Amino acid sequence: MPSEWLVWQMADSAFPSGGFAHSAGLEAAWQSGEVAAAAGLERFVRETVEQAGRASLPFLTAAHGRPDRLAVLDDLADAFLTNAVANRASRVQGRAFVSTCARIWPMPPLRDLEAQAKSLRGHYAPLAGAAGRALSIPLDVSQRLFLFQTVRGVMAAAVRLGIVGAYEAQRLQFGCAALLDAVRARCCALDERHVTQTAPLIDLLQSTHDRLYSRLFQS
């Protein structure tokens, strides 16, 4: 079991994993009028977390348990992410995350993972699972960290877009605690055989990101 400080460091917004360059489709949803204020943001976050539990967490779980299957899981993640914007974002975030981990903790397992990621498409969820295993982070903690970062990323994007203020975003994030626990409880045993799309509207909106007139985020 690693020091708890390591996990807190990864959860810190200062951890340079590149996640804050992406809005998970929120920017496109906001410009389309689907998210206009706090109530719409809360609905968006709920659907995003549910989607993360069903579509991303299974890849993390599978890679954490069998890092030797990372290449297969990476290919499956690539086939599943048919939305070009989401696919690109997953690859950018995955490689950035592993590279950051290897620079901060230059231990052989992470160096090997970084080298392997260069030969893969490098999707975020399976690489996050493999990195968690390399850092000896327990599976349940890796799952909670992944879901927490999902919410944190959306809330940070919402503040930068001006949808809500920083205090309101923190209040909404605190209100997601029960949701995060419930989603993890339902999805913690799922693997790559169970991935499914639960938020098709968000997926559709995110696919329009590259056609927005003005953009603050990459996705």
Image (tube, rainbow, N blue to C red):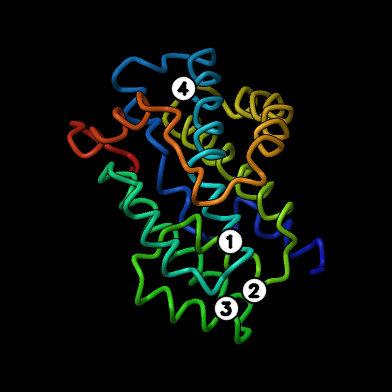
For label 4, the SS is loop
How far apart in space, not on screen, are marks 1 and 2 (Cα)? 9 Å
Residue behind mark 3: 110
How far apart in space, not on screen, are marks 3 and 2 (Cα)? 6 Å
How far apart in space, not on screen, are marks 3 and 4 (Cα)? 38 Å
Q: Is residue 64 above or below residue 86?
A: below
Q: Quadrant of the N terminus?
A: bottom right
Tell me which amino acid carries mark 1.
Answer: Gly
Where residue 166 appears, as percent x and y from the top left, is: 59, 29
How far apart in space, not on screen, are marks 3 and 1 (Cα)? 12 Å
Q: Residue at x 28, y 41 (%)?
A: 83
Where residue 97 appears, as percent x and y from the top left, is: 50, 63
Residue behind mark 2: 134
Tell me which amino acid carries mark 2.
Answer: Ala
Q: Which mark is residue 18?
A: none
Tell me which amino acid carries mark 4.
Answer: Ile
Tell me which amino acid carries mark 3.
Answer: Leu
Residue behind mark 1: 129
CB under 8 Å between discs 3 and 4: no
Where residue 21 appears, as percent x and y from the top left, is: 41, 49
CB under 8 Å between discs 3 and 2: yes
Q: Say whether disc 1 or disc 4 marks the residue closer to the N-terminus.
A: 1
Q: Say whether disc 3 or disc 2 marks the residue closer to the N-terminus.
A: 3
- Is 68 or 90 nearer to us in this picture? 68
Residue behind mark 4: 163
Indicate which label's residue lies in the foreground, 3 or 4.
3
In the orientation shown, which residue stands out farthest toward the bottom? 108
